[in-house]
């Protein structure tokens, strides 16, 4: 994961390669928008289809669709589910564990015979699906400060998390609701360092966490749960990123994921005593999204694509000495986020094999599966497992945020809203971002998230919407990630920054008709590209190149005919740049520069032909220019449009950002009279009146799942 360049203000940017989102929807088909419609489609009663949802994973959606009902379903998903459902199931359900209570009584004797030997001893671990009838869920934390990137203490009293008000590591008392910071780096204006993933030791006395320093490097650290004794466990020059996933049962080492400068990843153990590293397995450019260590310390489970071409993931089991590995869950679906249960007898994971994301479990004994996976809870939504308590309660996060693309009409002279913002797309609501107008203004292209994995093949598509007809079509480029689409001046191709199947960062052209991808420029390890844009004559491309090993950011112009590149501006050390905008005539460039020492954000102006940049506008703390703010030139070239926010300590709920304009000639800036929740990605329509933009933010809720683990039965 490339280090974020704007501290904790860009929370989603900091986590985008690690946190999942699940986008729901199915093409252009109309959904069935109530239990009654779903039941009528399946020619069954409402009670029957509700039972099928609970017991057999009928793909019914909730929450994310704006309709008159709280549930909806897509006919194609129901058809796929029905085709896979054995015809005899209505007479004899697939699992005895999921039968109604009256049938359970009749089946008790047969069930005992199937599960035991002649002397009554169980044949292997109890199946996790046996407890699904009594599952309870409860929300334990909601609000702008709720964060799922930590872990519960073994007794469930505390939850470690990132306090995004400052970026510090903190713990929350789950009984009183009080929070306490374990680090004290100061405000974002004082320091851009921040914590990320964290995990609590088995004795509940320490927290290990990843720390992004002011020097733009990653460290593995540990601190007492009372905030004392903070120290660095591991700092390696070769490691771009280090993430702690679990403590060993004896607390002597940490299971970590390393991302190396050559784009390879490693599963490793770090000694808590001396910081020594032992690599268990080296992977390629692909990496797990979740790893978990068994309670006895003998086995590691993690998710990983089975082949280089696969957009889906399977679950693998690796011995903690690195000597043996087996595929644990193999299925054409996407199986992700494996976690061991506290007794070590089951692994739970998320899977979309029923058409929606459900929670599944598979029994394990001696490092081997003891049966097929079974559904625990269907349709869990945008789910992220946080961790178990010793008593078997599972803390998990749900993403309730809505980031969407909007269109509005403004009188930018008076600041009056002529036409109120409306959502640009009607599908995958809450999962759309980064819009761009076509050159003639008739089409709108934007990114639509379609997978729990933000950086995975096919997880992000480019949707093209016809503004006159409302018709939409999706382009699925052969890339692991795509960012900030930009139409070519003739409308034939779209330019994106992103990464290919091997996670090589680059600038890519995508043919609008065929979706064929052509690399324009790629780089070696540790180098990332962003903010790509065309020149008006299509002869050159401008982009920002971030060189991690050298800690530099450079605005580059590339001649498409000769392949020659020229550096326009480079930033090193305490000064860095993030984002730029090219004038419509291609002659001038405005870019954002941030001084780590003074914490000031400034807009700089420079000629493309060469020469020193000059100060256009300076923003004084606590105001700032958000990391995803675009810099749009008006058609007459006299003004530049951008977004500004103000830091509000102690109030994470306040995230309204304003649209501004600055005069190029005088540097005089003014508000445009338009603001929205985390307004960003603003693009001017060719008519100079309409704008399209992204608004909204990620909002997490923390929940607890209880009473779903099997109750151990004593031997006779």
Image (cartoon, helix red, strand yellow):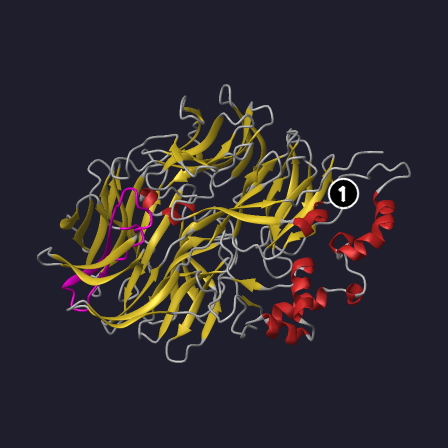
Query: Residue shown at 36%/50% (left/top)?
Result: 529
Q: Quadrant of residue 253?
A: top right
Task: Looking at the picture, tell me which residue is in the foreground, 69 or 402.
Answer: 69
Which residue lies most toward the bottom here? Answer: 469
Instruction: Tell me if residue 23 comes above or below residue 553 in the rendering.
Output: below
Instruction: Tell me if residue 559 comes above or below residue 546 in the rendering.
Output: below
**Magenta stretch prevailing secondary structure:** loop
Task: Estimate the x, y position of residue 384 in percent, counting from the top left.
Answer: 53, 47
The C terminus lies in quadrant:
top right
Q: Quadrant of residue 470?
A: bottom left
Number of marks present in the image shown: 1
Q: Tell me the magenta residue range.
A: 626-654
Task: Looking at the picture, tell me which residue is in the foreground, 330 or 283.
Answer: 330
On the image, numbered disc 1 is attached to which residue? 370
* SS label for mark 1: loop
Task: Tell me if residue 540 can be seen.
Answer: no
Query: Residue shown at 42%/54% (left/top)?
Result: 498
Task: Tell me if residue 28 can be seen.
Answer: yes
Which residue lies most toward the left here? Answer: 666
Q: Is residue 647 magenta?
A: yes
Q: Is residue 707 magenta?
A: no
Instruction: Tell me if residue 706 comes above or below residue 30 in the rendering.
Output: above
- 38 vs 382, left or right, is right
């Amino acid at each position: 994961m490339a280090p974020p360049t704007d501290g904790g203000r860009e929370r989603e940017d900091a986590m985008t390669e690690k946190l999942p989102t699940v986008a729901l929807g199915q093409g252009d088909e109309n959904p069935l928008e109530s239990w009654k419609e779903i039941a009528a489609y399946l020619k069954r009663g409402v009670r029957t289809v509700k039972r099928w949802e609970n017991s057999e994973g009928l793909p019914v959606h909730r929450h994310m669709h704006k309709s008159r009902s709280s549930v909806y379903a897509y006919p194609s998903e129901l058809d796929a589910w029905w085709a896979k459902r054995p015809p005899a199931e209505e007479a004899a359900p697939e699992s005895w564990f999921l039968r109604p209570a009256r049938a359970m009584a009749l089946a008790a004797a047969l069930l005992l015979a199937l599960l035991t030997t002649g002397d009554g001893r169980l044949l292997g671990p109890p199946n996790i699906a046996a407890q699904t009838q009594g599952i309870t869920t409860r929300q334990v934390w909601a609000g702008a400060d709720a964060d799922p990137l930590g872990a519960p203490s073994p007794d469930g009293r505390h939850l470690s998390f990132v306090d995004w008000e400052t970026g510090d590591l903190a713990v929350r008392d789950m009984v009183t609701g009080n929070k306490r910071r374990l680090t004290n780096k100061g405000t974002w204006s004082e320091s851009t360092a921040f914590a990320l993933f964290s995990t609590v030791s088995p004795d509940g006395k320490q927290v290990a966490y990843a720390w992004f320093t002011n020097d733009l490097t990653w460290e593995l650290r540990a601190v007492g749960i009372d905030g004392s004794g903070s120290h660095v466990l591991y700092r390696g020059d070769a490691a771009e990123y280090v993430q702690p996933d679990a403590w060993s049962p004896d607390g002597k080492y940490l299971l970590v994921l390393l991302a190396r400068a050559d784009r390879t990843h490693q599963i490793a153990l770090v000694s808590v005593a001396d910081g020594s590293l032992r690599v268990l397995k080296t992977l390629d450019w692909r990496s797990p999204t979740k790893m978990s260590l068994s309670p006895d310390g003998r086995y590691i489970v993690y998710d990983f694509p089975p082949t280089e071409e696969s957009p889906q993931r399977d679950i693998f089991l690796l011995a903690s000495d690195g000597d043996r590995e087996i595929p644990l869950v193999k299925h054409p679906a996407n199986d992700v986020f494996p976690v061991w249960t506290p007794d070590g007898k089951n692994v739970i994971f998320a899977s979309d094999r029923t058409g929606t994301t459900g929670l599944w479990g598979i029994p394990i004994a001696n490092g081997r599966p003891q049966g097929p996976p079974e559904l625990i809870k269907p349709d869990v939504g945008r789910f992220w497992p946080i961790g178990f308590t010793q008593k078997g309660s599972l803390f998990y996060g749900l993403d309730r945020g809505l980031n969407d693309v909007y269109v509005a009409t403004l009188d930018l002279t008076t600041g009056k809203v002529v036409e109120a913002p409306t959502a640009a797309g009607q599908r995958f609501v809450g999962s759309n971002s980064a819009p761009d107008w076509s050159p003639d203004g008739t089409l709108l292209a934007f990114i639509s998230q379609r997978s729990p994995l933000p950086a995975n093949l096919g997880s992000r598509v480019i949707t093209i919407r016809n503004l006159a007809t409302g018709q939409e079509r999706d382009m699925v480029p052969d890339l692991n990630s795509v960012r900030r689409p930009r139409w070519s001046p003739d409308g034939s191709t779209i330019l994106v920054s992103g990464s290919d199947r091997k996670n090589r960062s680059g600038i890519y052209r995508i043919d609008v008709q065929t979706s064929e991808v052509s690399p324009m420029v790629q780089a070696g390890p540790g180098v990332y590209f962003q903010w790509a844009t065309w020149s008006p004559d299509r002869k050159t491309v401008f982009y920002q190149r971030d060189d991690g090993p050298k800690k530099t950011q450079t605005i580059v112009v590339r001649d498409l005919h000769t392949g020659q590149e020229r550096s326009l501006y480079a930033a090193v050390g305490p000064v860095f740049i993030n984002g730029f905008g090219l004038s419509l005539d291609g002659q001038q460039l405005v870019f954002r520069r941030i001084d780590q020492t003074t914490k000031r954000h400034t807009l700089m102006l420079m000629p493309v032909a060469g020469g020193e940049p000059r100060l256009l506008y300076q923003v004084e703390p606590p105001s700032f220019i958000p990391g995803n703010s675009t810099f749009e030139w008006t058609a007459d070239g006299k003004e530049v449009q951008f977004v500004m926010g103000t830091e509000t300590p102690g109030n994470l709920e306040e995230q309204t950002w304003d649209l501004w304009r600055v005069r190029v000639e005088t540097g005089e800036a003014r508000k445009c009279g338009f603001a929205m929740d985390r307004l960003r990605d603003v693009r001017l329509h060719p008519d100079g009146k309409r704008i399209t933009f992204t608004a909204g933010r990620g909002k997490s809720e923390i929940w607890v799942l209880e009473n779903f683990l099997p109750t151990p039965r004593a031997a006779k």
